[in-house]
Amino acid sequence: CGTPFPLGCLYTQITLPVTVGNGDIVYNRVGKSECYSILGWFAGGNASIHAAARNGNVKHVSWANQEVINVLGIYGVYRTVVYGMGDHADPSVKTAASN
């Protein structure tokens, strides 16, 4: 069966690109949001780009990734991570310029 992302039978842990802006790939803030799934019967959360930007105080998104962890289809976590610019730099964030 085809899936929208690589899927392991027993365990999946991947990071995929979601989107990229049209400028330089620089950032001083990172935001995360997530949702979950249990047994494929129950799911909840908000893994939107908007929620991730709000959670990280990101005002201008440079790019976003999706992180997926799934164990046996029993438990899954789907996380959106946005990188961008905020009003003030987060000192815990290692920026692309400092790599």
Image (cartoon, grey):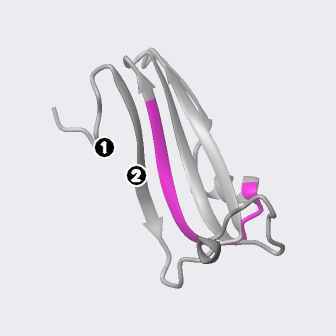
Chain part drawn in magenta: 56-69
- Amino acid on which disc 2 is placed: Leu
Give x and y (percent) for residue 74: 43, 15
Q: Quadrant of residue 50?
A: bottom right
Extreme bottom residue here?
23
In reply to whether residue 14 is colored magenta, the answer given is no
Q: Which mark is residue 32?
A: none
Q: Quadrant of residue 60?
A: bottom right
In reply to whether residue 64 is colored magenta, the answer given is yes
Question: Which of the marked residues, 1 or 2, is nearer the chain's N terminus?
Answer: 1
Q: Report whether 60 appears left or right of 8.
A: right
Give x and y (percent) for residue 22: 48, 82
- The residue to which callout 2 is attached is 16
Give x and y (percent) for residue 36: 55, 29
* Quadrant of the rendering where the N terminus is positioned: top left
Disc 1 + disc 2, Cβ < 8 Å:
yes
- Amino acid on which disc 1 is placed: Phe
Give x and y (percent) for residue 88: 84, 73
Q: Which mark is residue 5?
A: 1
* Quadrant of the rendering where the C terminus is positioned: bottom right
Q: What's the magenta bit mostly, secondary-structure-wise? A: strand
Q: Residue at x 55, y 42 (%)?
A: 79
The secondary element bearing badge 1 is classed as loop
